Image (cartoon, rainbow, N blue to C red):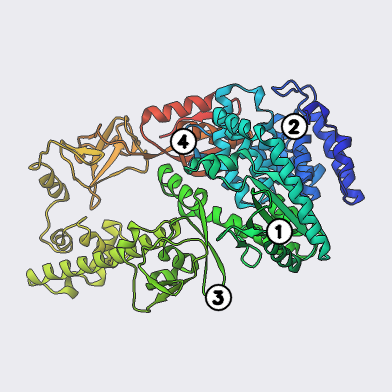
Amino acid sequence: MKDTDISFETIYSKLNFSKESMEMIKEAYEFAKSEHEGKKRLSGDDYITHPLHVADILINLNVDDVTIISAILHEVLNNGNIATKELLESKFGSEVATIVQSVSKINKLELLDETESAAIYLRKVLVGLAEDPRVLYIKLADRLHNMRTNWAIGEEKRKEKAKETMTVLVPIAHRLGINSIKSELEDICLKVLKPDVYNDILERLDKTKAELNDNLMQMKVDLSHLLSDNGIEHEIKGRVKSVYSIYNKLSTGRKWNEIYDILALRIFVEKETDCYTTIGLVHSKYRPVPKRFKDYIANPKENMYQSLHTTVFGNDGEVYEIQVRTYEMDEIAEKGIASHWSYKEKGTKKVQAIMEQKLEMFRNIIETNSDESDISFESNINNDLLSELIYVFTPKGDVIELPKDATPIDFAYRIHSGVGDKTVGALVNDNIVPLSYNLKNNDIVKIITNNSATPNQDWLTFVKTNQARTKIKSYFSKKDREELLSKGKNILEKEIRKRKLSINEVLNEEKLNKLLKDLKLDDIDDLYLSIGSLRYTAGYIINLTTEDKQDLDDVLIERIRPNKVSSYKDDIIVDGNSSIMYSLAKCCMPVKGDDIIGFITKGEGISVHKSNCPNILNESKRLIKVEWNEKTNNEYMTHLALQVSNSNFLMDLITEATKEGIHIVEMHNKDIDNGMICNLIIKVKNKEELSHLKNSLSKYKNIKVMETK
């Protein structure tokens, strides 16, 4: 269908909602048409044709009325004349307004480069749509229509969008079980990214298309007679496998004549019992290919896909892949489980709960990786979400979804962290296997535990899931803390005894409280940790509690003067020396490139300030020369204050920060007469990067960059 061929009347005639909902859909169309009045797509078509096509794609997925209304309106915030979220809320309700706003935010973000593409984009997408799965459906339909009309953009942009689609959106469509969208997107992306390969496969198929279609037609007739003779009501559809599906098989090293299931037939029946009867009849007439039967009805995939699969040799010598499923199973397989959100059907709450479970995997990865680098995040995304999947079973028959080559340890932590921590062995299909064993599809896994067991650090070398890796690291982080605490306590008590002092005297309540206050520590455990990690020496701590203590300036300067070194590992070099305890002052938050000065503090080493920081302008005695180590390339926290005229600044801020590769750590807003003051804490590599961001933000009329300390 061409964009110019679509009309609201055509779409409206396909809908069957309540009278009130149908009126709301009409109102949404009139509003969107007004908002997009005079605007054109790159193809030259009126802009309103795009949301109409998106709605049309979604109608075929049997979504609810709210999704259709939101789809028609999904571009009014980004490409409308006057629309705001508040206006949408007043006209169409908060549910629609929230969905449209989420889609609008997602559509403003693009992949920036290939190195961090999946991590950056997927993070923003998942955060943006975590509240309502229907946002996913609209985004996927939006991308599908844009990919169908991608001839209107340049070749380079086409390839960027194809890579983005394959990396981010196709896996999401797969996770949600929306096969109809997933398959079409895969074919379009292959055509864009590898046109020679795509055309070669298409040409080979075309050469034999007539013959293949004849074979399919004859097989359909034969199967239909077989089922009718046995009293099974049915419908059969035949197809030649998609170009991308064939490409996938060729890319594994198979030759064209080794692909045996190019021809596929799908049989639809009324009842689940009919599925098994049908497979039995098919196998009684046609010889099945060994090891090709799969029962996804008794053991559905985690995206709720159900079907019986088999491959048989036809009477013509061709090999046919045959799938047998009920009509309801086909709805879920092709359109996704959320397609049942009519809110009138039986079991709706169960369907919605399943959708929420699927999205929980995305949310967990966002939360788990909030403090990690983009590279680490991208690696975890690829491992946990985008990798090839296997499905294994607990001894009770529950299905567990894991990445390919996952191990029994990954399986154990997917069950529960308590099971993972206490794992001592594993049985796979009743055979003892090593814990590093790579699990296969349909394996039955039993984990052997022992209450006195603990994780093994060697597990980190072979586990595949981020969940397992995080839990193991967390255990050893806690264990290391306990060891350092015990070590610090022993060192301090040994030094006290060595000086022939009393432990109760050195660490009495009054002295301990003063010591913790001076060193800015929370409790005695923090004190032991500081000694165990060599932050402070036991002698220094004891000196602070007795009369026999040196001036703090002298202690630090003694550490500094004799130890000149030629290579530095720290970010800050103190008077020509490395490995001196320092901290970047929180009052002025200097970054690399700022002029800096050191201030000798009590118990905290050197506090590094900007040279013009008001807090050290009147100091002279305790100042010391410090400089940046030019060889390091770390990120630093710093302030950024903005005065904004309205609340719509957020997407502009996120977009510019993402372009610069800058991370927003904290944000605090304060209302003022003409808008608000937004105080940010951000991570930057240097002063130049910060200036770049300020200049970019200054171009927006609604944003004014304020001077900070």
Which residue appears at 63% of the width and 38% of the height?
A: 185
Along the line of sight, the residue nearer the viewer: 478 or 642: 478
Which residue appears at 18% of the width and 61% of the height?
A: 541
Which one is in front in this view, the residue at disc 3 or the one at disc 2? 3
Q: In the image, what residue type sits under mark 3?
A: Lys
Q: In the image, what residue type sits under mark 4?
A: Leu
Image-based side of 385 in relation to 275, left or right? left
Structural crowding at the residue carrying mark 3, measured as other residues with C-alpha within 10 Å and reported as few (<14), some (14–19) or many (≥20): few
Q: Label 3, on which residue?
A: 396
Asked which quadrant contains residue 689, the reply is: top left
Which one is in front in this view, the residue at disc 2 or the one at disc 4? 2
Which residue appears at 30% of the width and 63% of the height?
A: 457
Image location of residue 183, percent across then percent down: 64, 43
Residue 36 seen from this side: no
Q: Label 2, on which residue?
A: 50
Measure the alpha-carbon separation of dots 4 and 3.
55 Å
Q: Do the residues under discs 2 and 1 have CB atoms within 8 angstroms? A: no
Image location of residue 429, percent across then percent down: 46, 71
Which one is in front in this view, the residue at disc 4 or the one at disc 3? 3
Q: Label 1, on which residue?
A: 324
Residue 205 seen from this side: yes
Q: In the image, what residue type sits under mark 2?
A: His
